[in-house]
Image (spheres, rainbow, N blue to C red):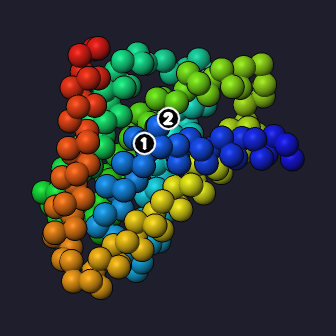
């Protein structure tokens, strides 16, 4: 029970930690176009992202996947930027009738985000069996992501009821996130 609580809390904190806001930015921009009636599609997309994240943590811990930390630090904000640009320019949700390419992209983005945490994760799990702790950690991640998604969808609904158009919400939300990413991308690209 102690392991369950420890690793689940670690997963929750991994997403909700204000110092590691990359996941929050990604989840917010991913969720901007959605309302409650699309929640099932959105949760599938977020879960697919989590599966990619978990797979990369497992592969990195097993020594199968090892990518330069400087590249990962550049690629993480790049994935957020690409998602924000999609939302901004196509003014739409990621999940559509032909969502298979976006599901694959969500897995790929999850792999990149997971690699950003893999060094710390490997240190925490050094000498321990990884399967069960990784499962608990993933439960914490998924729970935190669902909380963020629900909060953003709720905010989307409130803004809609206040008369804020979807276009304006997407334009302002994506632009703010792109503005936050600018300095991060410049800083991370200088270390490549």
Say the numbered circle drawn on residue 144: none
Closest to the observer: 175 or 106? 175
Q: Residues within 10 Å of mark 2 (few under 14, many from 20)?
A: many
Note whether residue 11 is visible. Answer: yes
State yes or no: discs 1 and 2 in contact (Cβ < 8 Å).
no
Q: Secondary structure at mark 1?
A: loop
Residue 9 at x, y = what percent? Answer: 68, 46
Q: Residue furthest right?
A: 1
Q: Position of residue 72 (x, y in %)?
A: 38, 25
- The picture quadrant where one finds residue 124 is top right
Q: Which residue is mark 1?
A: 21
Please indicate, yes or no, whether residue 110 appears anywhere in the rendered image: no
Closest to the observer: 53 or 186?
A: 186
Q: Position of residue 166 (x, y in %)?
A: 21, 73
Q: Residue at x 42, y 78 (%)?
A: 36
Instruction: Name the residue: 17% across, 57% down.
Output: 88
| Secondary structure under the numbered disc 2 in the rendered image | helix
Residue 114 is tagged as 2
Left or right: 66, with 174 as reference point: right
């Amino acid at each position: 029970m102690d392991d369950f609580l420890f690793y689940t809390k670690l997963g929750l904190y991994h997403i909700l930690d204000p110092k590691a806001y990359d996941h929050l930015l990604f989840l917010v921009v991913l969720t901007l176009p959605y309302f409650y009636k699309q929640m099932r599609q959105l949760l599938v997309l977020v879960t697919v992202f989590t599966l990619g994240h978990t797979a990369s943590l497992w592969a990195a811990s097993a020594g199968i996947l090892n990518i330069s930390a400087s590249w990962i630090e550049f690629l993480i904000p790049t994935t957020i930027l690409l998602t924000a640009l999609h939302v901004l320019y196509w003014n739409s949700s990621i999940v559509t009738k032909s969502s298979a390419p976006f599901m694959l992209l969500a897995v790929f983005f999850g792999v990149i985000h997971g690699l950003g945490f893999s060094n710390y994760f490997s240190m925490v799990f050094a000498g321990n069996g990884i399967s069960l702790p990784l499962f608990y950690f993933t439960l914490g991640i998924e729970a935190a992501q669902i909380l963020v998604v629900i909060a953003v969808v709720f905010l989307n609904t409130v803004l809609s009821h206040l008369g804020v158009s979807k276009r304006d919400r997407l334009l302002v939300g994506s632009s703010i996130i792109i503005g936050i990413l600018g300095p991060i991308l410049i800083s991370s690209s200088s270390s490549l």
